[in-house]
Image (spheres, rainbow, N blue to C red):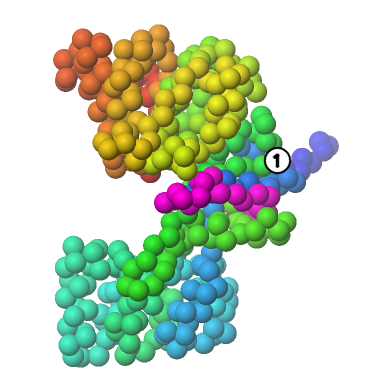
């Protein structure tokens, strides 16, 4: 009879591991317009395994103050029982803390409100908003549940009706900023904390605000899981050169890549393009990157700080300036990585690559686009993106 094998349970979004925060420190200097944090998550004893290029799933919680504000605004009993995950009864206060999104109103909530509102001008206004998709999107973009209650205070909700109108909190994925080769018992994150004010009230991003609120107390309260990557990984051939483009928090996976390449003794060269607003306040991980340069682990570091001169300079502009060398690297088999904003940055980087293929590869525009987007990205799989 064979011996039974005990395996570590797999942690998922529905079965996360409760971790502790080991470190939380600002990455921006005084005077910055940004609040970016370096957060170290302690996974010692969890059995969790991750690789450079993976993401950490975080299951955020609503802040106590916001939960209390919503309960008071809608005159709801925090101890009232409602169905929780799996149908298990939980208090309304716990449900609003751990299950439902409160910091952004949803289309679902507005449409439920339109059905419940009493006849009159208020109901007409809600129906007008709910029936126009563009107006509805604009309306909910800057409002949370408290803002809406201020505008439409008459509607009466039962606890069950209220939670049925809400959307559930979804896990947030953060690119891991560490290599297990250097930090097997930790996961490092680079988090941009979102804070803003609309309709006379201060607000914050759900996940980033939650992470920023956690102190390195040793308490295991942060629900996490590892989301493995299927495509955003280092080349198996350690002699291959890599080019990394990661402005802002897009630097995160490339910090992991540099740690991994150094730990594994990779002989391929590493080239990083980094950008942010100001060099004096927003040069994330500056000391580390300069040490990599001095050590030789980083062959080249090109930085673009958009607010340090009259005309804004971004990473794609630096790519064009270094186009000839970049093209030579690609033709010799280098892998090209980009991480960060999908809507603007990644699109502009993609266009810069096409322009480089035209200018330095002698390709016609259509052929250049096909080479970058088909040959490099799909056939050879050397153009890899982690964009959001």
Q: Residue 276 is drawn in which quadrant?
A: top left
Residue behind mark 1: 185
Is residue 163 shown to the viewer in this render?
A: yes
Q: Nearer the viewer, residue 186 or 374?
A: 186
Q: Residue 376 is drawn in which quadrant?
A: top left
Give the image location of residue 79, x and y in percent. 57, 85
- Residues shaded magenta: 10-35
Q: Is residue 23 magenta?
A: yes
Q: Is residue 131 magenta?
A: no
At x 42% / y 25%, what residue is drawn?
302
Give the image location of residue 338, x and y in percent. 40, 31
At x 32% / y 36%, what residue is drawn?
309
Considering only vertical position in the picture, is 280 above or below 171?
Answer: above
Magenta stretch, overall SS: loop
Q: Nearer the viewer, residue 326 or 379?
A: 326
| In the displayed structure image, the side of residue 265 where residue 154 appears, left or right | left
């Amino acid at each position: 009879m064979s011996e039974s094998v005990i395996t570590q349970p797999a942690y998922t979004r529905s079965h996360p591991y409760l971790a502790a925060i080991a470190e939380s420190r600002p990455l921006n200097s005084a005077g910055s317009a940004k609040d970016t944090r370096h957060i170290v998550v302690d996974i010692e004893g969890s059995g969790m395994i991750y690789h450079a290029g993976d993401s950490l799933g975080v299951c955020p919680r609503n802040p106590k103050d916001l939960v209390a504000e919503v309960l008071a605004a809608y005159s709801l009993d925090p101890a009232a029982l409602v169905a929780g995950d799996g149908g298990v009864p939980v208090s309304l206060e716990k449900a609003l803390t751990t299950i439902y999104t409160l910091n952004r109103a949803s289309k679902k909530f507005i449409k439920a409100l339109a059905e419940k509102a009493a006849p009159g001008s208020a109901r007409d206004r809600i129906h007008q908003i709910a029936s126009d998709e563009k107006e509805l999107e604009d309306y909910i973009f800057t409002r949370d549940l408290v803002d809406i209650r201020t505008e439409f205070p008459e509607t009466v909700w039962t606890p069950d009706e209220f939670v049925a109108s809400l959307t559930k909190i979804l896990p947030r994925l953060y690119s891991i900023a560490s290599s297990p080769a250097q930090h097997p018992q930790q996961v490092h994150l680079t988090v941009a904390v979102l804070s803003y004010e609309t309709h006379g009230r201060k607000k914050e991003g759900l996940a980033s605000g939650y992470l920023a609120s956690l102190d390195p107390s040793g308490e295991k309260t942060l629900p996490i899981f590892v989301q493995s990557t299927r495509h955003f990984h280092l080349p198996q051939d350690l002699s291959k050169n890599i080019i990394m483009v990661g402005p802002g928090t897009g630097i995160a996976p490339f910090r992991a890549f540099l740690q991994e390449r150094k730990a594994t003794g990779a002989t391929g060269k590493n080239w990083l393009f980094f950008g942010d607003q100001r060099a004096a306040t927003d040069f994330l991980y500056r000391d580390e990157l300069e040490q990599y340069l001095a050590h030789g682990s980083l062959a080249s570091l090109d930085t673009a700080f958009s607010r340090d001169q009259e005309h804004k300079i971004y990473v794609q502009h630096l790519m064009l300036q270094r186009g000839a060398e970049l093209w030579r690297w690609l033709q010799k088999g280098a892998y090209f990585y980009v991480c960060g904003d999908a809507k603007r940055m990644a699109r502009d980087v993609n266009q810069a690559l096409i322009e480089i293929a035209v200018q330095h590869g002698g390709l016609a525009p259509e052929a250049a686009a096909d080479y970058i987007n088909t040959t490099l990205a799909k056939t050879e799989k050397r153009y890899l993106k982690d964009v959001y």
